Image (tube, rainbow, N blue to C red):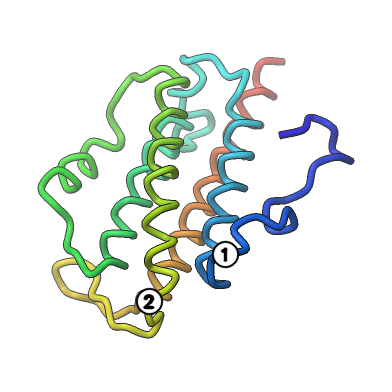
């Protein structure tokens, strides 16, 4: 990623993932944009800042864990699976932990790397195919789950950006 604002081109304008159908391509571009933004805004935070909850905001650490793990969970639903015992266990542990920033960013990168292949496969499916979410099997579709991966992830990326800005401003 370039540090010059004039040179930065958002992922959806880079011509990448051209071999993936439009909905999947948009999700892949959202993953790329998320990684750009997370790296830009989280870099420079201390490990203590990453775990801080300034002004009652959730910590950057929580959001990084949640981004990585919810991406996996949502793709499981898109694939027609229910959550595994391991996925449920890590869900319950999202608010706990004292990992350094580097480990949190590595978890996000690994999650996104895994997600790329899964999205590529799902993007070629019939996007209207029913999928049930959770124990109640709330109705969605493959396409709905894919779009929600991007939407949900970007919502939490925005929270990381906001919290990082607050933390940097509080430094004085």
Say which label, 1 or 2, has the lower sequence index: 1
- Image quarter of residue 104: top left
Element on which disc 1 rests: loop
Q: Residues within 10 Å of mark 1 (few under 14, many from 20)?
A: few
Q: Residues within 10 Å of mark 2 (few under 14, many from 20)?
A: few
Q: Is residue 24 left or right of residue 29?
A: left
Count of number-bearing discs: 2
Name which residue lies at 50% across and 66% down.
24
Comparing 110 with 88, the one in front is 110
**Residue 14 visible, this orientation:** yes
Name which residue lies at 37% across and 57% down.
118
Name which residue lies at 49% across and 37% down.
57
- Frontmost of labels 1 and 2 is 1
Comparing 21 with 83, the one in front is 21
Q: Position of residue 137 (x, y in %)?
A: 19, 75
Relative to 126, does residue 150 appear above or below in the rendering? above
Work out which quarter of the rendered image holds the C terminus and state it. Answer: top right
- The residue to which callout 1 is attached is 19
Label of residue 125 in the image: 2
Label of residue 30 in the image: none
């Amino acid at each position: 990623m370039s540090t010059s604002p004039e040179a930065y081109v958002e992922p959806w304008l880079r011509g990448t993932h051209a071999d993936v159908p439009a909905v999947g391509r948009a999700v892949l571009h959202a993953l790329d944009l998320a990684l750009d933004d997370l790296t830009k805004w989280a870099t420079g935070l201390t490990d203590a800042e990453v775990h801080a909850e300034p002004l009652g905001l959730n910590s950057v650490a929580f959001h990084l864990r949640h981004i990585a793990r919810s991406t996996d969970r949502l793709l499981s639903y898109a694939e027609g699976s229910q959550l595994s015992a391991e996925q449920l266990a890590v869900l319950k542990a999202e608010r706990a932990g004292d990992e350094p920033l580097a480990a949190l960013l590595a978890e996000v990168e690994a999650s996104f790397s895994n997600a790329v292949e899964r999205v590529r496969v799902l993007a070629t499916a019939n996007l209207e195919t029913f999928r049930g979410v959770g124990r109640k099997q709330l109705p969605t579709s493959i396409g709905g789950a894919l779009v929600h991966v991007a939407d949900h992830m970007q919502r939490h990326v925005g929270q990381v950006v906001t919290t990082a800005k607050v933390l940097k401003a509080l430094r004085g």
